[in-house]
Image (tube, helix red, strand yellow):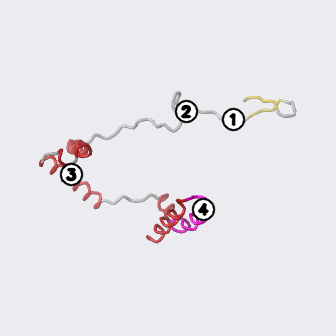
Amino acid sequence: MGRSNSPGGALAEVDDFLEHYGVKGMKWGVRKDRPTLPSSADAETASRLQGQVKIGGTKALSNQELQSLVTRMNLEQQYARLNPQTKSVGRELAELALRAGGPLAVTALSSHLGPVGPIAVAVTTAIAKKK
């Protein structure tokens, strides 16, 4: 229990205080590295080939490499279509709130958004009409 001087000059008991139990030397907002799952050889090859395409275009790949990359990308797209990601409850609530009040809020704030205001109003209105 610590003691502190009160404004009246008398000593007062201080029961509540803030104490930090963080990791020494850790910076705010920086997370520790988390271990990643190992990638398959095919995934590693596809990643390497995509890097080559970014640098030199598809002409930098042989026919066999390009075929391998296209096959991998098609398989990943098919898997994503067959196994859609579910949305979290928080994301669903946020989207509902944006659809319900987003256009109204952005319209009210559009004068403060400067030249981006009309674009923001159009985008949020389109999102609201989407569902």
- The residue that appears at 52% across and 30% down in the rendered structure is 23
The N terminus sits in image quarter: top right
The C terminus sits in image quarter: bottom left
Cα gap from disc 2 to disc 4, whole angstroms = 39 Å
Tag 3 secondary structure: helix
The answer to whether mark 2 and mark 3 are in CB contact below 8 A is: no
Residue 58 in the magenta stretch? The answer is no
Q: Which mark is residue 17?
A: 1
For disc 3, the neighbor class at 10 Å (few under 14, some 14 to 19, many from 20) is: some
Q: Which mark is residue 27?
A: none
Tag 1 secondary structure: loop
Main secondary structure along the magenta-highlighted residues = helix
Tag 4 secondary structure: helix
Q: Which mark is residue 72?
A: 3
Residue 104 in the magenta stretch? The answer is yes
Front of the two marks 2 and 4: 4
Among the two numbered marks 3 and 1 on one chain, the one whose residue lies closer to the N terminus: 1
Residue at the disc numbered 4: 109
- Among the 4 quarters of the image, the one containing residue 55: top left
For disc 4, the neighbor class at 10 Å (few under 14, some 14 to 19, many from 20) is: some
Among the two numbered marks 3 and 4 on one chain, the one whose residue lies closer to the N terminus: 3
Query: Residue 11 appears at what percent x and percent y?
Result: 83, 29
